Image (spheres, rainbow, N blue to C red):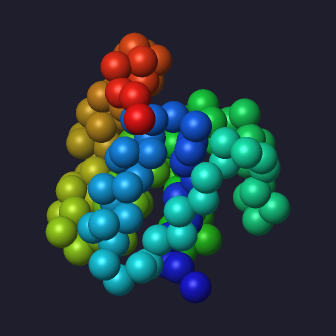
Amino acid sequence: MADVTVWYDGACPLCRREIAVMQKLDKRHSIDFVDVSEGQPESCPISQDDLLARFHVKENGRIYSGAQGFAAMWRAIPILRPFGQLARLPGLRQIFEVLYKGFLRVRPRLQRLVSD
């Protein structure tokens, strides 16, 4: 059983590419990647609409979203773990979240640029 669960939008070409990179880096297979584009996962207490609108990750039984979700995913991958740890620091936590919200604003345009 994986230590971390990542819920992602498999209908998004940008998301699929990013998750493919994370899957390659997850050599210990400590992350369970769940595509939520086709329906609500039974084991997830978050609605499908919310899962598709914002990145969510469960780490050690706790659910994180947005930038902290990415940080939780990074902590499960040894090469990215330092970035995940840095994102826990109070000042950096807010900076990462501001950057994530900026990404959400441009995500639709980026999705159109990235095609399969």
Percent of width and height locating residue 69: 45, 51
Query: Visible in this render: residue 16?
Result: yes
Depth order, front residue of 22/87? 22
Residue 109 versus residue 98 in the image, above or below: above
Identity of the residue drawn at 35% across and 83% down: 28
Q: Is residue 27 above or below residue 9?
A: below
Residue most toward the front? 116
Count of numbered badges drawn on the protein: 0
The quadrant where residue 22 appears: bottom left
Please tell me in which quadrant of the rendered image residue 71 appears: bottom left
Q: What x and y, as percent, mark residue 41?
A: 75, 57
Q: Position of residue 87 (x, y in %)?
A: 28, 51
Q: Quadrant of the N terminus?
A: bottom right
**Residue 3 placed where, x, y %?**
50, 78
Q: Residue at x 37, y 64 (%)?
A: 23
Q: Is residue 102 visible?
A: no
Against 47, residue 3 (above or below) is: below
- Residue at coordinates 37% horizontally, 45% vertically from top-left? 17
The residue depicted at 47 percent of the width and 71 percent of the height is 31
Position of 59 with respect to 101 (left or right) is right
Q: In the displayed structure, does residue 110 sit left or right of residue 81?
A: right
Q: Quadrant of the C terminus?
A: top left
